[in-house]
Amino acid sequence: MQDDDAACRIIDDRQGLVCQWWRTSVDIDPAEVADKLTPQALDQHVNHFTDPDPSTGRPFNQVSPFISLSAGTVERDAVARTNWVRRARRTALHFGTEFGWKTTAYLYPCWVILAPRNAVEIQHVAEEVRDLNTYRHYSPFQTEGEIVAKIEVPDNHIQCCEKWELVGGPAGFYRRVWSHPNPRFVRPERLTNVRELI
């Protein structure tokens, strides 16, 4: 995002978050979605993001049908016998500031429904691609933590737009400047099947 107005427009104009394929195509045909949501395309998105897309020759990050969301993760240090927690917000801010090269990042706290196992062909569930119980192939980026949404994250799944600033350069700290709430946000608890006690 280039400015505050553009950042807020995603929820104010009910745009939600859309993938680069939709953004660059302007209009996508639902019949094309099945051809885009493949294990090969997911691997390209996760591990070869800037490599050329085999079908278009363009960098894959410009035509990806997937949206990367930060989820946080835990890294195990077997030698030290400890686990290192990598928080989702910290990872998102790291990427949002392009690893400290920019001083401003906009975050969109949101929710998606996770598939319990590999289900790349099913559009309306997201994939936890850093979960080693589901995606066991080696990835040098496993410790980043990542959820991959498909095609779009609806606007009513986005809680707000937050503006963050990096203070003190790459080794500095982040501070939240403002938060713009989404009046159409629907909490994920609406989907729970737990009934209240009588």
Image: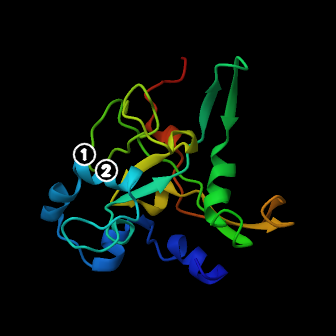
Q: Is residue 120 above or below residue 75?
A: below
- Amino acid, disc 2: Leu
Residue 21, image quadrant:
bottom left
Task: Return the mark for residue 195.
Answer: none
Q: Residues within 10 Å of mark 1 (few under 14, many from 20)?
A: few
Q: Residue furthest front?
A: 79
Left or right position of 167 against 135? right
Along the viewing direction, whichever of 165 and 18 lies nearer the viewer = 165
Q: Measuring 66% from the left and 62% from the top, which residue is drawn there?
A: 99
Along the viewing direction, whichever of 161 and 175 lies nearer the viewer = 175
Instruction: Kindly state the secondary structure of the residue where label 1 is placed.
Output: helix
Residue 26, image quadrant:
bottom left
In the rendered image, residue 197, in percent from the top left (x then y), is placed at 55, 18
Q: Could you tell me which quadrant the N terminus lies in? A: bottom right
Along the viewing direction, whichever of 61 and 19 lies nearer the viewer = 61
Instruction: Kindly state the secondary structure of the residue where label 2 is placed.
Output: helix
